[in-house]
Image: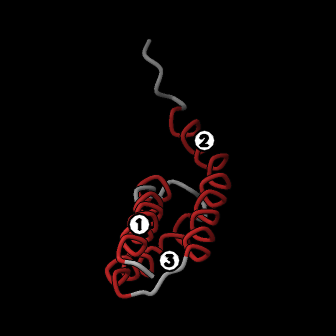
Amino acid sequence: MSDMNSVSYLVRITNCLQTILELESQLEKLEHGNSLLDEFVVLKSFLQKIDKVDLSEADVERIETATANFLRELRGPLAKAQKGGRKGRRLQ
């Protein structure tokens, strides 16, 4: 694998992991969000070691697909949590 590919893979996977980690504060609002947040420790640890992992295009594509699926699955619950948090906040 060339250095250029390695850097590209590293950037792509780091982007996926950071995108997921940015949801941390929003996941705290979900009913079962704490169970997901427990896994963030693993993600953060992996992110710190990612530059030592030998990656292939297929690995990166699987992680990108999994990230997209995860974000799609969270769209509904996060929208509900956001709506629920706005109740009773009307200005009169």
Residue 59: image location, x then y, percent: 58, 77
Q: Is residue 2 above or below residue 88?
A: below
Helix, strand or loop status at disc 3: helix
Give the class, few, some or many, for how many residues have Cα within 10 Å of label 2's Cα (few <14, many ≥20): few
Q: Quadrant of the N terminus?
A: bottom left
Q: Residue at x 60, y 67 (%)?
A: 61
Q: Nearer the viewer, mark 1 or mark 2?
A: 1
Displayed quadrant of residue 91: top left
| Residue 79: mark in rendering | 2
Amino acid at dot 2: Ala
Q: Residue at x 31, y 80 (%)?
A: 48
Q: Residue at x 43, y 72 (%)?
A: 5
Residue at mark 3: 39
Amino acid at dot 3: Glu
Q: Residue at x 35, y 87 (%)?
A: 52
Residue at mark 1: 8
Q: Nearer the viewer, residue 75 or 32?
A: 75
Amino acid at dot 1: Ser
Estimate the spatial distance between the alpha carbons at disc 1 and disc 2, rounded to whole Å: 33 Å
Give the class, few, some or many, for how many residues have Cα within 10 Å of label 1's Cα (few <14, many ≥20): some
Displayed quadrant of residue 25: bottom left
